[in-house]
Image (cartoon, grey):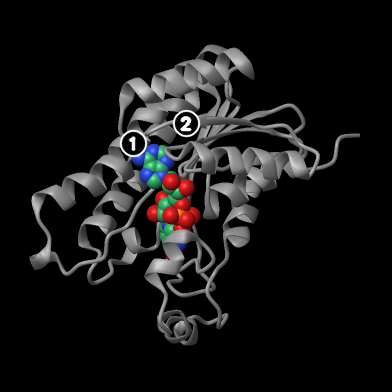
Amino acid sequence: MAERGDLTGKVAMVTGAGAGIGRAVSLRLAERGAVPAALDIREEAAAGTAAAVAAIGGKALAVQCDVTNYASVTAAVNRVVSELGAPDILVNNAGIDIVRMFVDTDEALWRKLVDVNYIGFLAVTHATAPHMIAKKSGLIINIGSDAGRIGNPGDAVYCGTKAAVMATSKALAREFARYNIRVNCVAPGPIGDTEMGDVLYGEGLGDKIARMIPLKRLGTAEDVADVVGFFASEDAAYLTGQVLSVDGGLTMIS
Ligand SMILES: NC(=O)c1ccc[n+]([C@@H]2O[C@H](COP(=O)([O-])OP(=O)(O)OC[C@H]3O[C@@H](n4cnc5c(N)ncnc54)[C@H](O)[C@@H]3O)[C@@H](O)[C@H]2O)c1
């Protein structure tokens, strides 16, 4: 009998897979038998993730892809489909954050954040969904953020992009249910051990934040990968349109 959570042979496309949460997710899905397609704007970072998957005995495909460029996205999806097959799982993880008080931001900054975090998510989902619809099955797991649920000072536009990802995920969960495609979101709280976390929680800020978290530590990329693994498994078969915080109890949104 297959083990619960077994993903043998599933094609799992992960964006922003070259570092942090995306790399941890790619490894977690590969440990369960999936074949990750590691998409990242940085080719060498994507290749590093594919090598890390190979090092644990898995198979992965590294694909250079800028999620803000629709032509780059369709080329990446076409390559995944022709080399691995239609994706069974899509993890929309690519994202950036630029912390600045709102009055100090400008239109270029707003557009950059919206482009990567929201338009990028739309583009990858739009290019991938027809392949899932054609086979009437799929799982889409989007990395939102608790910041988009509660708001953070210095992060107004980022919060908006993440709230948009989570709201669109719910609408898509309703649209795609008829095709047996589930759409869920993971909303991480502060995750320390990533490139983004290095920038956001450096210089002792991480320790201060950890003291406010009921479980008294920052999250890790592995913590997020565990929950993505859950959403990717049959244990989550009756869940769609959900947002689950992974934050050590920081927000406890009901
Ligand atoms: N670190 C945190 O505290 C935290 C908290 C909540 C949510 N998140 C979200 O989790 C996701 C991953 O965050 P992380 O901490 O691992 O970040 P990270 O910076 O460590 O990794 C992000 C990856 O995305 C890639 N990327 C950036 N722009 C891209 C583009 N245009 N096209 C393709 N790839 C691109 C980067 O090259 C990088 O490899 C993001 O969506 C982030 O907003 C992070």
- Residue at (28%, 69%) from the top-left corner? 152
- Residue at (54%, 73%) from the top-left corner? 248
Quadrant containing the N terminus in the rendered view: top right
Q: Which is closer to the viewer, label 2 or label 1? A: 2
SS of the residue under disc 1: helix
**Above or below 165: residue 226:** below
Badge 2: residue crowd in 10 Å (few <14, some 14–19, many ≥20): many
SS of the residue under disc 2: strand
Residue at image mark 1: 120
- Residue at (52%, 29%) from the top-left corner? 63
Quadrant of the rendered image containing residue 73: top left
Quadrant of the rendered image containing residue 99: bottom left
**Above or below 79: residue 35:** below
Q: Report if the beta carbon of the residue with label 1 is closer than 8 angstroms to ligand 1.
A: yes
Amino acid at pointer 2: Gln
Report whether 46 appears left or right of 162: right
Residue at image mark 2: 64
Q: Residue furthest front?
A: 44
